[in-house]
Image (tube, rainbow, N blue to C red):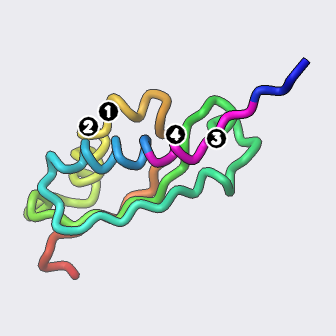
Amino acid sequence: MQAITHDVQPLRMNTEQAIREALAALDPVHIELIDDSALHAGHVGARSGGGHYQLTIVSPRFVGLGRLQRHRLIYQTLNSLMTGTIHALAVTARTPDEL
């Protein structure tokens, strides 16, 4: 029986692209997205296919919002991806004036 292998790189790129496309709704002036999934190999979330990411996002939409409100806005924006595609997301959210 021949082993079936899958190249996970295109999947990761598609996930990162999907995250960036969803976050475009927040009018970001800067996004940095780091995929830490490889550091969590064997973790329950990693086994189920969910990725681990670090997100730094700068947007004028965060003006007047506290940290918790900013995070809620991001999680609401990524809602459809948070149910399996993203297992863990570490967020740093700033306004352009906070740089």
Q: Quadrant of the C terminus?
A: bottom left
Q: Residue furthest right?
A: 1
The reply to whether the magenta stretch includes residue 12 is yes
Q: Position of residue 95 (x, y in %)?
A: 16, 70
Q: Are marks 4 and 2 in contact (CB under 8 Å)?
A: no
Image quarter of residue 73: top left
Mark 1 belongs to which amino acid? Asn
Q: Secondary structure at mark 4?
A: helix
The span from disc 1 to disc 2 (Cα, nearest Å) is 5 Å
The span from disc 4 to disc 3 (Cα, nearest Å) is 8 Å
Residue identifier under label 3:
7
Image quarter of residue 90: bottom left
- Residue lying at 34% horizontally and 41% vertically, measured from the top left: 18
- Specify the segment rendered in magenta: 5-13
Residue identifier under label 4:
11
Q: Are marks 1 and 2 in contact (CB under 8 Å)?
A: yes
Give the camera-side residue of 83 and 5.
Answer: 5
Mark 3 belongs to which amino acid? Asp
Q: Position of residue 57 (x, y in %)?
A: 28, 63
Mark 2 belongs to which amino acid? Gln
